Amino acid sequence: MTDKVHNVMIVGVGGQGVLLASEIISDVAMRSGMDVKKSEVHGMSQRGGVVTSHVRIGKKVYSPLIQEGETDFLMAFEQAEGLRAINWMRKDGIAIISRSSMVPAIVTSSKDFTYPDDAVAEIKKKLAKVIAVDADKIAAELGNPRLVNTILIGVLSNCLPFEANIWIETIKSLVKPKLVDINLKALERGRQIKLEAVKA
Amino acid sequence: MKELLSGNEAVARGAVEAGVKVAVAYPGTPSTEILETIAERHRSVYAQWSPNEKVAFEVGIGASLGGGRALVTMKHVGLNVAADPLMTFAYTGVNAGFVVISADDPEMHSSQNEQDNRIFARFAGIPFFEPADSQESKDMLLAGFEVSERFDTPVMLRMTTRISHTKTIVELGEPVKVSERKFVKDPSKYVMVPANAKVRHQVLSQRLVDLQKFSEETEWNRIESNGSPVGIIAGGVAYQHAKEVAPDFDYFKIGFGYPLPIERIRKFVAAHNIVLVVEELEPFYEEQLKIAGIRVEGKKYFGNLGELNPTRVAQGLYDAGLIKNVVHPGIEAEKLFPRPPVLCPGCPHRGAFMALRKLGVAVTGDIGCYTLGMLKPLNALDTCICMGASIGMAIGIEKVNGSAKGTVAVIGDSTFFHSGITGLLDAVYNQSNVTVMILDNGATAMTGGQEHPGTGHTLMGTPANRTDIETLVKALGVKNCRSVDPYDYEATLKAIEEETKNPGPSVIVTHRPCVLMPKRIMDEPFVVDLELCNACSACFRISCPAIAASPQTNERGHPKAVIDETMCTGCMLCAQICPTEAIVLKSKFVAA
Ligand SMILES: Cc1ncc(C[n+]2csc(CCOP(=O)(O)OP(=O)(O)O)c2C)c(N)n1
């Protein structure tokens, strides 16, 4: 690998598993011998607010924070949150977006705000490389709605230069034992989704 | 062995390596995980939650005087609460080593202010270390204990959110050998009556001179030379941001931040064409250097509000003419709806705020999950200053405005134990007519559900004595004390209405466990009968994340409601305020 630092941003809503996802990605990087820094703000994360995690991977990483406009890979567990993070992206960056949507009470109860009709379409207007995933549907097929994050990790794993078995080993060590099998299935489903396939 | 650890986890690991005997704290973001990690993974260290930071600090002092290394952790504003013992402990000095962690929160990610506690260290006259990653967090904790024992002083390890909550790779070490110490009677050192304190203040003065020498020599302050005519002085995460955007400049990396190595910095500055100080919040280093007649700049380019990041540091260096390019994002930010944190579905605090909103009384608030009661559309909380402030402020408002409409203080259980008790004592003593609502959810929920004196468990998981809130309230002298179920909207409304009319201080306690912690509560969900729903939006205004707009509308185009069954906990509050009785238990619902 070159000296280049890979910037991965993970966004979602409190309770969607942003923190576990960034933990897995960072651990894979460390196991692969890279320097890594992962930064996020917890605190309000369980109260339905926005959760953002920055993961930076390279030979040597200084700042734990990505610069605005320098994100190589965006992973969004909620589509409007993907759109909210759009300014953090490089124009040639890759966005992996779950088509899930969560409309907050503040939108429902007030006329001042609206939820975007099609956030994925908005993202596609701004970025060439977008992988929109029906992750809710795949998770439901696999039998557990909480697998959205692992499915997206599977998609992301195609984009990062780490070996497949390291992803598997890391999931085995970080996920609760009784959920390992189903998470590995989710990872594999994600790995089958590739940018080219989506674009074709 | 290497591990990926947050700054907080690294400090917890450091506690084991440093042979800490007692670790004590009151929770507060971003410091909380230090003690939680010790209790979870490093059980050789005794760890406890105290009711507040002042008590925690004093327990730490006692442990140190008793002869065991003591670690006390808190968020920045916690040090305000613990300031009284801190200021005088600086005079007495320690027996075994004492380190206090101040976890500051530039940008106020989870705080009510962004004070810079490096100033506190100087105010008290104690040295501080400023780590720039997790490795340093651990290593500086060990160094802190050495400095504490060598110079006979409490030491501060000053962290920030981006250090505490960033995971970086840490090389673990082995536990060090710590010499045995015993409690020694020494009144001239430990009894701070004026005659003794005068002597100890001189000792403190001389100690700072000695620490200054140490600061000039220690490798925690180091020069990184790249042969550049430009120098940067920085510590903590600001150092990382600067290295990120300008790796080729020369650096004076500060790790031991007070007293500053003034003479070494003087030489460093003299050897460069231009030197900038990159530091978050206050111009703490910059001002001291300028007072010493050293030619540096800093805040002029980087500002003193909020946290720094690579973008801001790059912009500052660009404005100073030191770098030629800054990254401009190629894509503009999108204007979207906000997504503020909200009370959870089923949160027992919701019922109290629905009632308070309805009554329109003045509500002084406190700090906890219930502070979210201030957000739209609940709009039911009027003030928030610091932990424990609600009761005293209500007393003040009531003294000025009288009690015609009623003044209500709202405070959580953990906050009541932290610093509400003395406020209530004041209300009793001075015959105030305030009504105090103690929202007991059996947890310190905001910071992650920690145990407290009312939960019946300690941090380390053992059973504990449980302080009963009503017994305590009555013992303080409150005559009107009752409890009410916050899931019963009418009863809550009535209780507040009556108690605000009662003369003298009243207390209403609500007991319903937090729906998330210690265990997740999920009862049978409710559903909306769309035949009956008339789209009045009353249920939208209780701000429950489980209630959303249905695609179905009424004749005027207003959306009817729908309940997300996976989120609904069955608290029944929405069903009680629905004027058409359209919200019913799932099992009772018969589709038309
Ligand atoms: C002096 C101080 N210490 C710690 C904190 C961090 N903090 C904010 S709210 C809170 C506790 C809230 O618990 P409780 O009063 O029981 O309310 P809940 O969140 O459970 O509703 C803590 C510890 C703070 N803001 N100030």
Image (cartoon, rainbow, N blue to C red):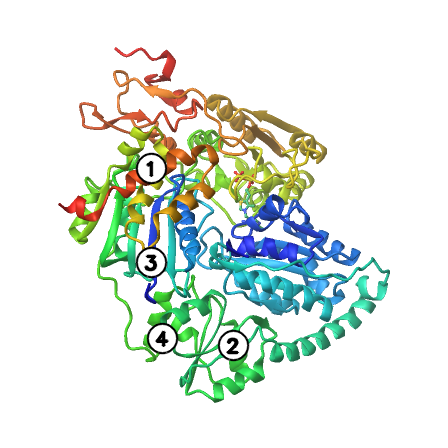
Q: Which kind of residue does numbered mark 1 sit on?
A: Ala
Q: Amino acid at mark 3?
A: Asn
Where does label 4 land, which residue? B317
Looking at the rendered structure, whether the residues under marks 3 and 4 are on a common chain is answered as: no
Identity of the residue drawn at 33% across and 37% down: A186
Looking at the rendered image, the disc whose residue lies closer to the viewer, 3 or 2, is 3
Viewer-closest of B505 and B38: B38
How many residues crowd mark 2 within 10 Å: few (<14), some (14–19), many (20+)? some
Q: Chain of mark 3?
A: A
- On the question of residue A148 being in view, the answer is no
Chain for disc number 4:
B
Per the image, the residue denoted by label 2 is B287
Instruction: Find disc 1 in the rendering and name its residue.
Output: A186
Element on which disc 1 rests: helix
In the rendered view of the protein, which quadrant contains the N terminus of chain B?
A: bottom right
Relative to B311, B411 lies left or right: right
Most extreme residue toward the left is A200
For marks 1 and 2, give the one nearer the viewer: 1
> Which residue sits at x=46%, y=25%?
B522
Tell us which disc is closer to us: 4 or 1.
Answer: 1
